[in-house]
Image (spheres, helix red, strand yellow):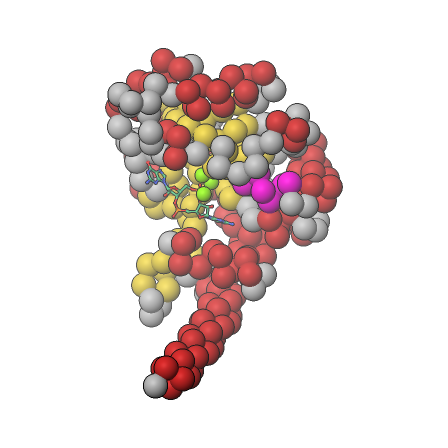
Amino acid sequence: RSKKTGGANFAFYTQDILVEANNRLTIAAELKRAVAGGELELYLQPQFDIVNQCVVGAEALLRWNHPVKGFLTPADFIHIAEQTRSIRFVTQWLVKEVFSIVERWQAHGHDLFLSFNVSALDLSDFELVDAMHNTARHHNVDAKRIELEIVESAIIENFQSASNILNTLRETGFSVAIDDFGTGYSSLAYLDKLPVDKLKIDREFTGKLGADDQGGVVKSVIDLAANFGLRVIAEGVETPEQEMHLQRLGCARAQGYYYSKPIPVSQFDKTFLQLSRV
Ligand code: C2E
Ligand code: MG
Ligand code: MG
Ligand code: MG
């Protein structure tokens, strides 16, 4: 009996793997079609200066309007896109979108930057650098208005190549932020070698700010950033109390649902362009 159950489980397990593998290939193939067919969309989430109370920039977050599966968020497909390497097509598309949004803002006199997320794979060769430099030729955009977000592990796991690429981009004037800071290696040994301009404090730490947590970790990251000459922003701010703590701790910038969820570009323009510095 136990043998039979084991066999059935095994068959079931094998089935799962096949379904999973198939799903992966489907998503990879569909993603290529999605890029070409206009199914991808950028949502923007504003980043605030909480000292002067104005919008200073935004983060671009990917959404997929899938014809059958509906509205997908990155959790549904980014991981698979990375594993199957189809993230490259996405990033190529992303770069063009980001430049055209920034060009439009700049042409209308808005002093805003736009950041976008890149994966480890995007830092494994010069494809991203080529895309950025080629796209820059077709758009009238100050490089300083474009920022790349990358998690620490993506830099450290392939340090030499990633540093070369990020430094090449920074020499052109683009800036680089470490995303989800504090959840990765955060090794002090690496910190002064990281080719970056900004740290984004992960929402895990921001979310804990309150009566029981006066912000020891957050304060440490703020001090760290100051000591290394880096800018800093807190992610995942959801309440006015959290903002108050950040102001008290000397964190000048914040992003999170308290200000706005990620929203379509047209809605961002309507709501937030008027709140930017001029
Ligand atoms: P991330 O870059 O750390 O982005 C922040 C995520 O936290 C976003 O989820 C955002 O909607 C969410 N968030 C923002 N404020 C709050 C808040 O106050 N509370 C809570 N609970 N959540 C908040 P989203 O858009 O689902 O993106 C998830 C992750 O997917 C991103 O994390 C990023 O790592 C990845 N991702 C998104 N867009 C792209 C992309 O275009 N390319 C690549 N390679 N990765 C992307
Ligand atoms: Mg990010
Ligand atoms: Mg983050
Ligand atoms: Mg993240």
Measuring from the top left, give residue 236's x and y in whole percent. 36, 34
Q: Is residue 153 magenta?
A: yes
User: Which of the 4 image quadrants contains residue 167?
Assistant: top right
Measuring from the top left, give residue 187's x and y in whole percent. 60, 31
Main SS class of the magenta portion in the image: helix
Position of residue 156 in the picture relative to residue 251 (left or right): right
User: Which of the 4 image quadrants contains residue 270?
Assistant: top left
Measuring from the top left, give residue 255's x and y in whole percent. 38, 31
From this view, report whether residue 53 is shown above or below residue 104. above
Position of residue 39 in the picture relative to residue 258 (left or right): right
Of residue 45 and residue 104, the one placed in the foreground of this image is 45
Instruction: Mark yes or no: residue 243 visible.
Output: no
Of residue 100 and residue 5, the one placed in the foreground of this image is 5
Instruction: Mark yes or no: residue 220 visible.
Output: yes
From this view, report whether residue 201 is shown above or below residue 216. below
Position of residue 175 in the picture relative to residue 20 (left or right): right
Say which residue appears at 33% left-offset and 67% top-offset: 69
Say which residue appears at 46% left-offset and 74% top-offset: 17
User: Which of the 4 image quadrants contains residue 171?
Assistant: top right
Say which residue appears at 26% left-offset and 28% top-offset: 239
Q: Is residue 66 magenta?
A: no
Measuring from the top left, give residue 216's x and y in whole percent. 41, 20
Of residue 159 and residue 132, the one placed in the foreground of this image is 159
Q: Which residues are magenta?
A: 151-156
Quarter of the render that holds ligand 3: top left
